[in-house]
Structure formats: structure tokens, C-alpha cells
Image (cartoon, rainbow, N blue to C red):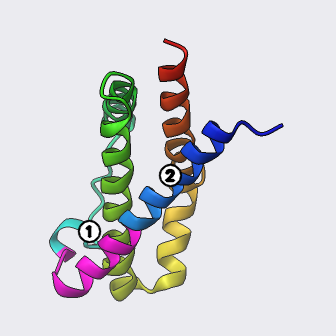
Amino acid sequence: MVNLKSAFSFCLSTLMFTTGIVLGFFSALRHDYSAYFGFDPFDNSNPGFLFFFKHNIKVALMLWSGAITFGATTLLNLTFNGMILGSAVKTTTEQIGLIKTLLLLLPHGVLEIPGMIIAEPLVLKSLTHC
């Protein structure tokens, strides 16, 4: 049996993330974000493991802080990450095309995006057990 609160939380987090993607996409129609998401084929400076590890720890702590703020920071994080994703996809699609953009996004996003969407219901569920 599906818990109604969990289903609502999952739908809410999916809606917030999707709304962020749409807002980011339409924002990129009006603003040039190529300086932030530009694809430079001659740039060989890739951030190392430690950079991504630190970044993901910060994101995890921000998601966890949603338990203290009754889910508000987690929902904001989902929306902002969706906005970043939407504007980045729009910007890089103009530069390198949709197929290459999706191929670059797929290895990174296949675990991270569902993980963020699932994290919100878990945070809200932890609030009900306090």
C-alpha cells in the first residue's frame, strides 16, 4: 500500500524540480549564460574528484537541513538545481546540439537527479517521525 504522504511528497518534489527546469530554460531564452555554461572544446582543465566530492557533501548537507526547516531548503534546492539544469541544457544545446548535450548530461544526471527528487520525500518523512 502506498503511503499518501510519501506519494504527495514525491509528486511535490518532482513538480518543483520540473518547474525549475522550465524556469531555467525560459530564462536562458532571454539571457546569455554561455559564460557560465559555455562549452569550450579547447579547455582541458577538468575539476578533480575532490571538487565534486566537496560539492556533493555541501548539497547533501543542504538537503539534510530541510529536516530543520520543514523541507523549505530542500524544495528550494530542487527548484534552483532544476533552473540550473534547464538553463545549462538550453545554453549548451545552442552550442553543441541536443544529442551531445544529452550524452554529456546522462552519465552525471542518471543517478543525481533521481537522488535529489527522492531526497525530499525522505526529509519530509523524517519530520513525521520526530
Q: Secondary structure at mark 2?
A: helix
Count of numbered tags: 2
Q: Give the residue drawn at x 50%, y 78%.
A: 100
Q: Give the residue drawn at x 60%, y 54%.
A: 110
Q: Secondary structure at mark 1?
A: helix
Asked if residue 85 can be seen in this view, the reply is no
Which residue lies under the disc numbered 2? 12
Residue 23, image x, y percentages: 31, 72
Q: What segment is highlighted magenta in the picture? A: 21-34
The quadrant in which the N terminus is found is top right
Instruction: Give yes or no for residue 24 being in the magenta stretch.
Output: yes
Task: Please identify the quarter of the rendering in which residue 85 is found.
Answer: bottom left
Which residue lies under the disc numbered 1? 37
In this picture, is 91 found above or below 113?
below
Residue closer to the observer: 86 or 13: 13
Residue closer to the observer: 41 or 55: 55
Tell me which amino acid carries mark 2.
Leu
Is 18 situated left or right of 6 in this image?
left
Is 106 situated left or right of 81 in this image?
right
Q: Give the residue drawn at x 65%, y 45%.
A: 7
Q: Of the residues tagged 2 and 1, which is closer to the observer?
A: 2
Q: Earlier in the sequence, mark 2 or mark 1?
A: 2
